[in-house]
Image: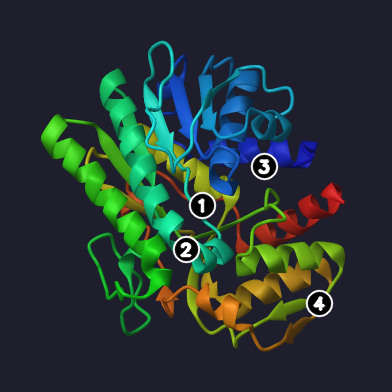
C-alpha cells in the first residue's frame, strides 16, 4: 500500500460518518487479520485519528508475521505486535488492558477455499475461540468479522436482512467458508450466553479498494489489478449474480460504528445502498475507471470450485444505518480510487 494525500483525504472523509468517534479515544484495540483489506483500512483510520485528533488509541496487531505487519504499516509508531495463528490451538495473549478486540483473521481467498477447505473451516472456529478467550479474560468487547455468505442461497432478488437465512449444502467442501463463519457466529453467541462475553458481529459483502493483495483471487480483486495495469478485465461467467460491494474505507467506518455503538449479541450487515449491483456491473465500473474493456472466458475446474454458491448476496444495511452510519463513496468513486491507488503501486 503506497499512501497518498488523496487517500488520507478519503480516510478523513470516512470518519465523518462514524457517530461518537470520541468514545474510542485513549482505548486499546487488539486486531487480528490486520493486514487484510478490511482490517488494514480500519488500522489506517485509527492511525489517522491519532495523528489528526490526538486520539491516543493503542493498537495491538496479532498475526503470524511481524515483518508483514511492519511493511504494511510503515511508520505507524503506535502499533505493537503479538504472535497469533488462527489455525493454532495456542492461547492468544497480550500485556496490559484491552478495551476492544476486532477479530478479522480468516482465510478469505477463493483459491484457498477450493484447495484447503479443512483449514478454511478450522481457522474460523479455532481463531474465534482464541479471540473470545482473550476478550473474556480482559473484559473487552469483541467484534467478529463474519460474511454475507452466512445467509446461504435463496430465490429472488430481495436483499438479506440479518434474520434471513437460506440453504447451504453442508457436504459441498466449498461450504467450509460459510459454515465456518456460521459456526464462529454461534460461538460468539454461546460465549455471550454462557460467560457474559460482550460480542458484536458484522457481515460485510464484497470489499474492494486500493489495498488489494496480489495473492487475492476474488473476482473484484482480479478486475481491479487488471484495470490498473491497463489490461482487459476477464470475466469467467455472465456476471449476473447480485452482490453488495463496499469500498474498503466505507466498510471500515461501518465496522468502527458497530464496535462503538452496536448492541451486544447482535449482527449487522455492511452494505452501500449505491453499490448493490451485479458482478458484471462491478467489472464495468472498474473497466471504465481504468479505460479498458471487459472480455469473457470459460473458467477452469479449479476456479469453478472456488465460486461463491450464492446467486444473490445483496444486503440490507438498514439496521446499521439506524446507528447513524452511512456510506460516503459511490461505486464510480470507489472504482476510480481503487484503480488509481493500484496504479501508484506499480
Secondary structure of residue under mark 3: helix
Residue 228 image position (x, y, % from top left) = 81, 62
Q: Choose top left, top right, bottom left or bottom right for residue 157.
A: bottom left
Q: Nearer the viewer, residue 108 or 77?
A: 108
Badge 1, how many Cα within 10 Å: few under 14, some, many 20+? Answer: many
Identity of the residue drawn at 54% across and 17% down: 55
Secondary structure of residue under mark 4: loop
Does residue 80 appear left or right of residue 194 in this picture?
right
Mark on residue 158? none
The residue identified by callout 4 is: 232
The residue identified by callout 3 is: 10
The residue identified by callout 2 is: 273
Residue 286 image position (x, y, % from top left) = 72, 68
Rounded to the nearest whole Å, what is the CA distance between mark 4 and mark 3?
Answer: 27 Å
Badge 2, how many Cα within 10 Å: few under 14, some, many 20+? Answer: some
Residue 152 image position (x, y, % from top left) = 33, 71
Amino acid at each position: 500500500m503506497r499512501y497518498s494525500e488523496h487517500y488520507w483525504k478519503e480516510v478523513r472523509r470516512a470518519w465523518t460518518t462514524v457517530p461518537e468517534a470520541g468514545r474510542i479515544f485513549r482505548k486499546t484495540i487488539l486486531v487480528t487479520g490486520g493486514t487484510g483489506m478490511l482490517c488494514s483500512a480500519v488500522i489506517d483510520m485509527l492511525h489517522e485519528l491519532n495523528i489528526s485528533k490526538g486520539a491516543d488509541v493503542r493498537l495491538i496487531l496479532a498475526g503470524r508475521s511481524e515483518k508483514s505487519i511492519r511493511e504494511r504499516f510503515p511508520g505507524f509508531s503506535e502499533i505493537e505486535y503479538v504472535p497469533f495463528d488462527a489455525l493454532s490451538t495456542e492461547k492468544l495473549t497480550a500485556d496490559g488492558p484491552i478495551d476492544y478486540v476486532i477479530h478479522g483473521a480468516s482465510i478469505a481467498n477463493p483459491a484457498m477455499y477450493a484447495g484447503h477447505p479443512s483449514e478454511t473451516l478450522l481457522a474460523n472456529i479455532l481463531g474465534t475461540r482464541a479471540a473470545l478467550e482473550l476478550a473474556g479474560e480482559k473484559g473487552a468487547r469483541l467484534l467478529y468479522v463474519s460474511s454475507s455468505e452466512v445467509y446461504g442461497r435463496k430465490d429472488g432478488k430481495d436483499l438479506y436482512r440479518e434474520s434471513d437465512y437460506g440453504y447451504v449444502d453442508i457436504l459441498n467442501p466449498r461450504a467450509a467458508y460459510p459454515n465456518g463463519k456460521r459456526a464462529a457466529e454461534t460461538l460468539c453467541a454461546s460465549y455471550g450466553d454462557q460467560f457474559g462475553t460482550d460480542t458484536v458481529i458484522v457481515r460485510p459483502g464484497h470489499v474492494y479498494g486500493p489495498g488489494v493483495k496480489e495473492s487475492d483471487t476474488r473476482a473484484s480483486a482480479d478486475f481491479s489489478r487488471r484495470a490498473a495495469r491497463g489490461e482487459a478485465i476477464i470475466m469467467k461467467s455472465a456476471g449476473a449474480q447480485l452482490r453488495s460491494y463496499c469500498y474498503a474505507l466505507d466498510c471500515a467506518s461501518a465496522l468502527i460504528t458497530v464496535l462503538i455503538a452496536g448492541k451486544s449479541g447482535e449482527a449487522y450487515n455492511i452494505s452501500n445502498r449505491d453499490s448493490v449491483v451485479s458482478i458484471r456491473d462491478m467489472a464495468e465500473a472498474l473497466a471504465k475507471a481504468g479505460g479498458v474493456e471487459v472480455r469473457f472466458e470459460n473458467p477452469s475446474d479449479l476456479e469453478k470450485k472456488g465460486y461463491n454458491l450464492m446467486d444473490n448476496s445483496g444486503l440490507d444495511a438498514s439496521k446499521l444505518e439506524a446507528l447513524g452510519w452511512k456510506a460516503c463513496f459511490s461505486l464510480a468513486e470507489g472504482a476510480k480510487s481503487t484503480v488509481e491507488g493500484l496504479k501508484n503501486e506499480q
